[in-house]
Image: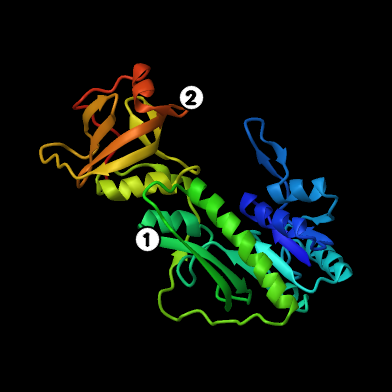
Amino acid sequence: MAFAGTPEFAREAMARIHAAGCHIPLVLTQPDRPAGRGMKLQASPVKQFALEQGLAVAQPRSLRLDGKYPEDALAARAALEAARPDVMVVAAYGLILPTWVLQLPRLGCLNIHASLLPRWRGAAPIHRAIEAGDAETGVVIMQMDEGLDTGDMLLTGRRPITSADTTAALHDHLADLGADLVLQALDLAALGQLAPVPQPAEGVTYAHKIEKAEATIDWSLPADVIARRVRAFDPFPGASSAMGAEVVKVWRAQALDAQAPDAAPGQVMAADGEGVRIACGHGQLLATELQRAGGKRLPAADFLRGFALVPGQRLGTAG
């Protein structure tokens, strides 16, 4: 089998597949990207694991033979044809697979998708499920076709979304679930026992890519919406608000039912050891973990020892 993936979510699945004794003659992953304060080129988690295990790695910039980088696509095709995989497992790869890739493995391409399809097709299903207040999410092993996450469903696993779940925490749970499911799918595929189920035509939603601009807190929104966004944007991009002359990130918060009819959205109602209580469009937000630029995440009590906030002060710009 071949494997295509890039981030930590994919690395977990590949590590489990490798540990199960599956032969992986070729790994596809995104090209190295600049990262960190020095912006040095950094290999993806999938590439790092593959190199540690001595697996062959290809990093095409595109797989389209008629695209911008046809030489990359031709080299990738030659590598895949030489590997002769029966199946390719795909997890958060980040490149569109053209028809020639989908048709090359005898059993096609199996995708590990972190949502309960057809809800949250697209790039950021974990973030969007939390942001929307979904009660549950899960992982679907999907037989890939030429559409955007439109293929038949092969296996499904479910998990509740708790009020404490952040994208970081839920990611780890779903990565583990996805690894379990894809191993089951590979066993069933080898036996010819996979049972494809078409996705329902209704209930389709799209999980658009997270943009940095979404990080800015709009205090005119209801407190429960803001609290979900705080959890959804942890670890990236981090919900943030102007506080005086600085922009501060809010990493942990809870919505309060208490109303503040005479307060403007973004107005600080209290700032003490329990947290920073802020008026919203409806209700109030209690921020309990915050971070200054260049600093560490701190409980509110520690944060306030070095950052003065007083009742009546207004944060950010309400929309």
Query: Which residue is pictured at 27% across the width and 44% down the height?
Result: 255
Quadrant for residue 152, please give it. bottom right
- Viewer-side label of 2, 1: 1
Q: Which residue is mark 2?
A: 295
Whichever of labels 2 and 1 marks the residue nearer the N terminus, that label is 1
Q: Amino acid at mark 2?
A: Gly
- Residue 197, horizontal then vertical, whole percent: 55, 82
Q: What element does badge 1 sit on?
A: loop
The one nearer the camera, 4 or 17, is 17
Few, some or many residues within 10 Å of mark 1 (<14, 14–19, 20+): few
Query: Which residue is pictured at 85% across the width and 71% down the height?
Result: 84
Query: Which residue is pictured at 81% across the width and 55% down the height?
Result: 57
Q: Residue furthest left?
A: 262
Asked whether the residues under the numbered discs 2 and 1 touch, taking CB atoms below 8 Å apart as contact, a structural biologist would say no
Tell me if residue 219 can be seen. no
- Residue 126, horizontal then vertical, whole percent: 48, 56
Tell me if residue 67 can be seen. yes
Few, some or many residues within 10 Å of mark 2 (<14, 14–19, 20+): few
- Residue 277, horizontal then vertical, whole percent: 25, 33
Residue 102, placed above or below residue 255 = below
Quadrant for residue 67, please give it. bottom right
Query: Which residue is pictured at 79% across the width and 67% down the height?
Result: 1
Quadrant for residue 39, please give it. top right
* Distance from Cα at disc 2 to Cα at disc 1: 34 Å
Color style of the picture: rainbow
Q: Amino acid at mark 1?
A: Ala
Q: Which residue is mark 1?
A: 135
- 197 displayed left or right of 130: right
